[in-house]
Amino acid sequence: MSEANEFAAVTKAFSGLGVDENLFISSLGRWNRYQRESYRVSTPGFFNEDERQFQRWSDHHILQLRQEFLRLKDAVVLYTMHPWERDARLFKEALLLKIPQQDVLIETACTRSSEDLLGARKAYHSLFEHSIEEDIAHHIKAHERKLLVALVSTYRYEGPKVNDDLAKSEAKVFVNALKDAKKKNLIEDEEIVRILSIRSKLHLKAICSHYKEMTGNFLDEDLDGDLILKQVVQCLCSPQTYFSKILISSLSLDVEESAKDSVTRVIVTRADENDMKLIKEEFQSKYGSTLAAKIQEVANGSYRDFLLTIIAKSD
């Protein structure tokens, strides 16, 4: 391999999701001091010429690399955890940020089975010696607090029965609420909060179906003005659509760190669920590429190989 090609390969190994450890060993490890200096000079995206005449590595990139070296570790630890502990820790981490990650709270509360959500609440007690509900009420002061507390507290019916007349009636509740949305914030509507937090997922799908018949529109699309309610409806009724959108927006080189973390969270938490097969099908249908090909394109090294191994289980 020519020096220019080798430099380009090492730069790629330093970029994207995770790092290519094997390339560091086979290429970078063999370079002498002059080759390393040549690399620094030829890679201004990583290194800046200091006023005291040396190539200084960007502080931002050093921090970013430290996070990328940890990416495999974080994925392995999450994957090995009991699902109840994993979800309890996801709840806690989402709440401890300066601006709580409400999307992670909703995703975790709405895409788990009733038993697993109850288990996560039990694990939260053991790990942190208070309840998720207490911590949400403490950290979130806005209008959505009531909805979020209700979502994590619920134990939904998971049987096959749906009262179709009731579903039709509750679809009308959404129709009327959306008509009055300019007068009243939807997330403050007690009927909307009640329906979303207690009804079974099959019942909610029936509501969405009746809403489409009544209005000609998809409920989640009509909720574009309220992203929290839109996410709740998607996570409850079509999680494969929601997760596919998260993955396509996260599998990119120019996204924020929290978005990159979503790749690990989604793939690890959905690995043992039927969701993963549906997510892969939805991803390919919607974006014209397989999820595996997108991971291969963006991720690096052992982190990439670990993700590919996980998603291959559902083939």
Image: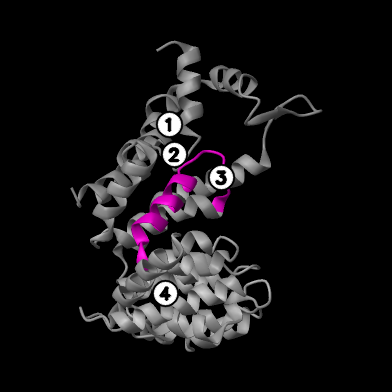
Could you say where residue 109 lies in the image, as x and y percent from the top left?
A: 41, 74
**Mark closest to the chain's N terminus, 3 or 2:** 2
Whichever of labels 1 and 3 marks the residue nearer the N terminus, that label is 1
Judged by its main secondary structure, the magenta piece is helix
Sooner in the amino-acid sequence: mark 3 or mark 4: 4
Q: Position of residue 110 (x, y in %)?
A: 40, 72
Q: Which mark is residue 255?
A: 3
Residue 271 is left or right of residue 193, and the answer is left
- Which residue is found at the position 34% from the left and 62% from the top? 269
Of the pair 93 and 215, the residue shown nearer to us:
215
- Whether residue 1 can be seen here: yes
The reply to whether discs 2 and 1 touch (Cβ–Cβ < 8 Å) is yes
Q: Which residues are magenta?
A: 237-257
Q: Amino acid at mark 4?
A: Ala
Q: Secondary structure at mark 2?
A: loop
- Label 3, label 4: how far apart the Cα atoms are: 25 Å
Q: Mark 2: few, some, or many residues within 10 Å (few <14, many ≥20)?
A: many
Q: Residue at x 50, y 35 (%)?
A: 15
The one nearer the camera, 250 or 46, is 250
Circle on res. 19:
2
Considering the numbered disc 4 on the image, is that residue within a helix, a strand or a loop? Answer: helix
Where does label 4 land, which residue?
109
Q: Circle 1 sits on which residue?
A: 24
Badge 1 amino acid: Phe
